Amino acid sequence: MTKGRKASSPLRIEILTIFPQIFDSYFGESLFRHARVKDLVRITAHNLRDFTTDKHHKVDDRPFGGGPGMVFKVEPVFKAVQALKKKGVGARGKGKIKTRIILFSTRGKKLDSAMARRLSKYDRLILVCGRYEGVDERVAERIADEEVSVGDYVLSGGEIPAMALAEAVCRFRPGFLGKQESLEEVKGSYPVYTRPEAFVPGKGKRPWRVPKALISGNHKEIDAWRRRR
């Protein structure tokens, strides 16, 4: 358990997007489904269009200085974040919820285990998912606490990065994996095998066998094999 944190305190993940239904399947299955049932994590995808004031619910406009594509406006993001901050009071009104606001950007710091572990110590993450040509830079300058990238490539929006960050972070939360020993950061990363011991890929083909060390029953030999890899 993380020092100073009760297991009953769920991590809140608030996602700002124009496609909130994208997240329904991913966060409704497997580990996330169990974690949400056990109230280890609470995930809400908010539609940025709900924070616009015009009748067309417009979230983007043409870039100043010209150029291709459209740019996310600062106003909807600002209003959404402000609305969420008003709800940022702790249990029974005691204190503020420790919050981190993240904007996904190709110019951001690359997501890794160290970042995920750091972010797992927050009470709430607000994830801003851009689209189109980008997001008004004032969001990065004035609203977000940090910019995050998930790799040296370009995606159409921040939704997939939001899913990746959410899982990377939640893996460090007590109870999400069931056993903390499942973390690769704890047990290390090495090749794994399961039954059958010998798999024949086709008639007359040589079987693909499990390394002898792993079926030896000798734990020292197994540990040595894993360390070598």
Image: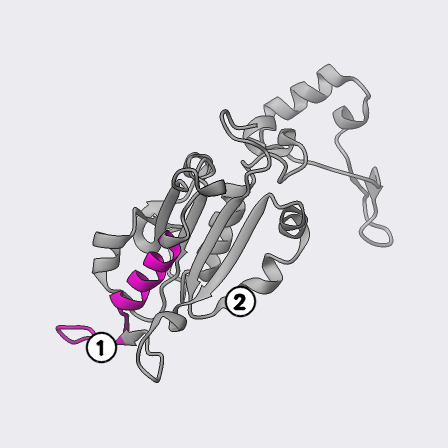
Verify whether residue 119 appears in magenta. Answer: no
**Residue with the most extreme right position:** 203
| Relative to 221, residue 42 above or below | below
Residue 75 % position (x, y): 26, 67
**Residue with the most extreme top position:** 220
Residue 195 % position (x, y): 82, 40
Q: Residue at x 38, y 41 (%)?
A: 96
**Residue with the most extreme front position:** 92
Determine which quarter of the picture holds residue 130: bottom left
Determine which quarter of the picture holds residue 72: bottom left
Which color mode does the image show? Answer: one colour
Verify whether residue 75 appears in magenta. Answer: yes
Residue designated by label 2: 22
Q: Amino acid at mark 2?
A: Ile
Residue 106 % position (x, y): 32, 55
Q: Residue at x 49, y 62 (%)?
A: 45
The number of callouts visible is 2
Q: Amino acid at mark 1?
A: Arg
Are the residues tagged 2 and 1 within 8 Å (C-beta)? Answer: no
Residue sitting nearer the eye, 97 or 193: 97
Q: Residues within 10 Å of mark 1 (few under 14, many from 20)?
A: some
Sequence-wise first label, 2 or 1: 2
Q: CA distance from mark 2 to mark 1?
A: 25 Å
Residue designated by label 1: 62
Residues shaded magenta: 61-85
Determine which quarter of the picture holds residue 187: top right
